[in-house]
Amino acid sequence: MDSFRAAGSLAAAVLCIGCDASPGDRSQDFSVRDSAGIEIVENHGEIPELVLPAEPRLRLGRQDGPPEYQMFRVVDALELDDGSVAVVSQVEPLIRLFAPDGEIRDVFGSLGQGPREFGLPQRVWKAGADSLVIYDWRNRRLAYWTAGGGFLSVSPLRPIPPTPIAGGRFRDGTILVTSLRMTRSDEFTWSPLSGMRYDATGAFRDTVFNVPGWNLGPVEIGGETVFVDRHFEGLAGARALQDGIALTLGDAYEVRILDPAGRLTRLIRWTGRDRTVTAAHVAAAREAMSRRVPEEQRQSALRRFDATPAAEQFGTVSGLRPGPEGSVWVQEMPRPGDPDGERWLAFDGAGRLLGRLALPPSANLTRIGRQNLIATETDELDIEYVSLYALPPELVAAREGR
């Protein structure tokens, strides 16, 4: 998974994920107004609860058998137009292509620095009807392959930003890369998140945004000064949509929609929970962390937890995923005491909040397609799977205007 906190947090608290809202039985109130050329979308009322099918339509992964069918350290997966699935793993074989029935079709990519090798593949996108582009994080480059496993070319990113994170691919083939940097100060200070656009050849095109990314400050732990972010603080994050950028600062129930050049075009807002952090929240997070950390690491983890201050308010968003036709999914920020399982809010391309979807506790949302969503999962034996679940019919109907 690549939620904003997983990508950048230094906090030691281990939190459960979810939301305590009661299931809604009516549609959201939805209004749109214009403010100086910026569209303001307001969603109010109870959030309808969506239900994921009990079983996936397709599950990839096995406990035993040929190694290409066993999933290890899967970081991305993509459903192609013909129903086949491209899976990106960080353990060889790195790229696996599965037919719509789950049978392996092809594998390619080994670890290395050569043209046909990958240092550490991180993301895969469609690059036309019959080709793929794979973001190689360690080698800092884009690798182009056919959907049948044929090598085409590699394009190094230039210049290379610090700590690059792949933010997605735009319809025109350019790539969004974000960089979350660290500013060291004698007090807690916001460090920047930058968004940069690269063309299909890997050449830098422009910087499209610079926003406060995470709030870092020094604390002393065991006689050593370390920089941490505060418990429960929101982090900024961004993802490329087909023709825009979804950006959240993690400090409001709001998603900013930018055009590819970084200009604000829309604000999507919704009603969330009270954000006040209480002593009870801190105590619950400390207890949860203590239970999950191995005994030999517990005292060290507790010292770190106790040395780190808590934010006054909870952050709001933990992750973003683009969907079809400009839609965007928003992961709700976790809080102590919430039920297990990621919870995602689904917004259509106009910013209308369609509902909340809870994932199984062991699942992490990877992709949203036109008919299916893809999640990575682990079972009680820690066996990894890539699962395709049919989207709730309400979401399909809303997209089709029914």
Image: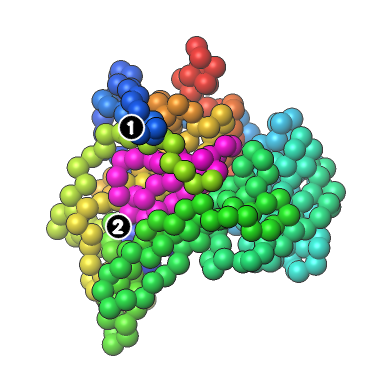
At label 1, the amino acid type is Ser
Q: Is residue 377 above or below residue 159?
A: above
Q: Give percent across and percent down for residue 238.
A: 47, 49
246 in magenta: yes
Residue under label 2, please give it. Answer: 233
Q: In the displayed structure, would residue 104 be above or below residue 347?
A: below
Q: Is residue 251 left or right of residue 351?
A: left
Highlighted range, magenta: 234-260
Q: Is residue 102 above or below residue 156?
A: above
Q: Residue at x 58, y 37 (%)?
A: 242
User: Tag 2: residue type?
Assistant: Glu
Instruction: Identify the secondary structure beneath mark 1.
Output: strand
Residue corresponding to mark 1: 35
Which residue is at 39% across, 47% downward? 248
Q: Residue 7: x percent and y percent? A: 47, 59
- Which of discs 1 and 2 lies nearer the camera? The answer is 1
